[in-house]
Structure formats: C-alpha cells, structure tokens
Image (cartoon, rainbow, N blue to C red):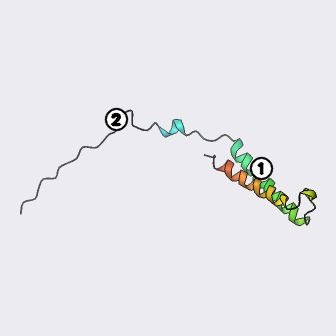
Amino acid sequence: MPKSRVRKKKVYTAPAELRPKTAESSHQPSPTWVPVLAVFFIVLGIGWLVSYYLSNGTFPVAVWGLWNLGIGFACLIVSLLVLSRWR
C-alpha cells in the first residue's frame, strides 16, 4: 500500500499586538528592603511569641493577655504577605 504524503504545517506566529512583552522589562527584581522587612517581621513575631511563653504572660505586655498571641501571629502573617511580593 502506498504511503501518503506528510503535509507540513506552517508554524503559527501571533500578530505583533498580541505577542507578550519581554519578561525582563515587566518583571524587575525586588528592592533589597523587601526580604529585610520580611525577616524583621519573622524575628519580631517569633520573639514576641517566645517572650510571651517564657514569661508566663507577663512580658511583652501583661495587660493584653492572650492578645499577645494575636500580635505575634499577626507579625508572622505580615511577613508572609511581604514575602509574596518578593521576586
């Protein structure tokens, strides 16, 4: 049985107005303060929680009570939000 001819398809190229811009121009690296700020909030949050637990609730602010846990975890969540912007 004879073999059929293989047709070559033309390679599709999108029109110039639909082509994506170069990735280098739109994605600039983050400034150096972004990871520094994230590490600061991580250390602050962990330090706040550790100092609260080791002092049995009398330090950093005894009047706030269990809100000290909320502040420590809020610092950790802020660090995650800052790290989500890091490139």
Image quadrant in which the N terminus is located: bottom left
- Answer with mark 2 or mark 1, whichever residue precedes in sequence: 2
Image position, residue 36 (x, y; %)? 73, 46
Spot the residue most to the top.
17
64 vs 12, nearest the viewer? 64
Residue placed at 71% from the left, 51% from the top? 79
Give the residue at mark 1.
Answer: 40
Q: Is residue 60 left or right of residue 8?
A: right
Label 2 secondary element:
loop
Image position, residue 49 (x, y; %)? 82, 61
Label 1 secondary element:
helix
Image position, residue 57 (x, y; %)? 90, 63
Residue placed at 74% from the left, 51% from the top? 39
Residue kind at label 2, given as amino acid type: Pro
Residue placed at 69% from the left, 44% from the top? 34
Image quadrant where residue 29 sits: top right
69 vs 55, nearest the viewer? 69
Image: 54 above or below 7: below
Give the residue at mark 2.
Answer: 15
Residue placed at 10% from the left, 59% from the top? 3
Q: How many tags in the picture? A: 2
Residue kind at label 1, given as amino acid type: Phe
Q: Distance between the residues labelled 2 and 1?
A: 47 Å
Question: Which label sits in the foreground, 2 or 1?
Answer: 2
21 vs 52, nearest the viewer? 52
Q: Is residue 56 left or right of residue 40?
A: right
User: Residue 18 bears which disc, if any?
Assistant: none
